[in-house]
Amino acid sequence: MTSIIQSIVLDYQPFREYDILFTFFSRDNGKIKAVAKGAKRMNAKLRGCLEIGNEVQIMVARGRNIMHLAACDTIAVHHSLRKDLQKTLLWQVLIEVITTSTVPENAEHDVYTLLSNWPKFLNDNFCDIPKRNLIITYLVIWKYLSSIGLSPQLSECVRSGKKLYPVDTFFSFTDGGLVSSTQRQVTDRHLSLTAVKCIRYIWLSSFWEKLSDIYKIKLTPVEEDEIINWLRDYIRQMLEKDFNSINYWQKLYLYGNKILA
């Protein structure tokens, strides 16, 4: 029995002598794997359309233990994005996060939409401002966490459930949300009013429409670092790991600027 599945290529690895095992994130079935027989051969027809990040429509046949890839049509390849290393690395960050932290065959439509929209956003809105790009990338990962049920509570105190007022505010990484000064504990992190307003402005609005405003918001270097550390540490708390692609991007485009200076 064959199925037609719309999906995005996440990863691939050698499988037997001439075959390749591909990992896809599909719109209706979540993360799936399928073997492309003979894909290592120089004249393999499927190889060209199965680059990581490509949005494709695949035909698969379910075997006894694994699915087999029968055909593939390209939907989007993002040629212009691939010509820019910085954009490509930021694109790869979300691909790596989803590849390593999603479970197989669990349909998550919001994750597919996020994975599809992220390269389009980079292609249409990218500005070469490293710290702002890092904030935006971390916010996209926060959006991914939200889509799998790990959204931070930013509209009210996570402990009391009461409305937060523009006074001293803290964030609990263990409880996953903002905390009022009356509910704070020793381990909670103090956040500036500017940092909270900035993230809430993006988070509680139409996400993709407001995300590019990060480039325009007035922030001091200290405030940028505060937001970066807040976003990053919540991701580490939830996913319990760092990601190679974002570490590599930082070495090239964030820390690299200081070395060159």
Image (cartoon, helix red, strand yellow):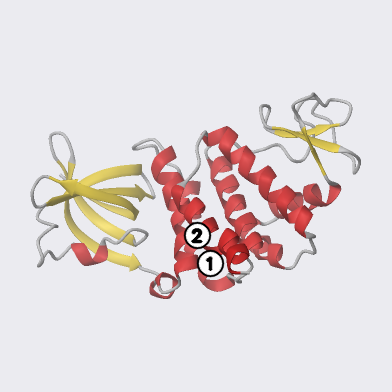
| 257 w.r.t. 16: above or below | below
- Count of labels in the image: 2
Residue 116 seen in this snapshot: no
Q: Mark 2 near mark 1, Cβ–Cβ under 8 Å? A: yes
Q: Residue at x 61, y 57 (%)?
A: 134
Check disc 1 and report the residue beneath it: 122
Which is more N-terminal, label 1 or label 2?
Answer: 2
Could you tell whether 159 is left or right of 143 in the image?
Answer: right
Q: Who is closer to the viewer here, 230 or 36?
A: 230
Local SS, label 2: helix
- Tell me, yes or no, if residue 137 can be seen here: yes
Query: Which residue matches tag 2?
Result: 90
Q: Is residue 85 left or right of residue 184?
A: left
Amino acid tagged 1:
Leu
Q: Position of residue 198 (x, y in %)?
A: 77, 54
Q: Is residue 110 above or below residue 119?
A: above
Give the alpha-carbon distance from disc 2 to disc 1, as whole Å. Answer: 8 Å
Name the quarter where the N terminus is drawn.
Answer: top left
Label 1 sits on a secondary structure element that is helix
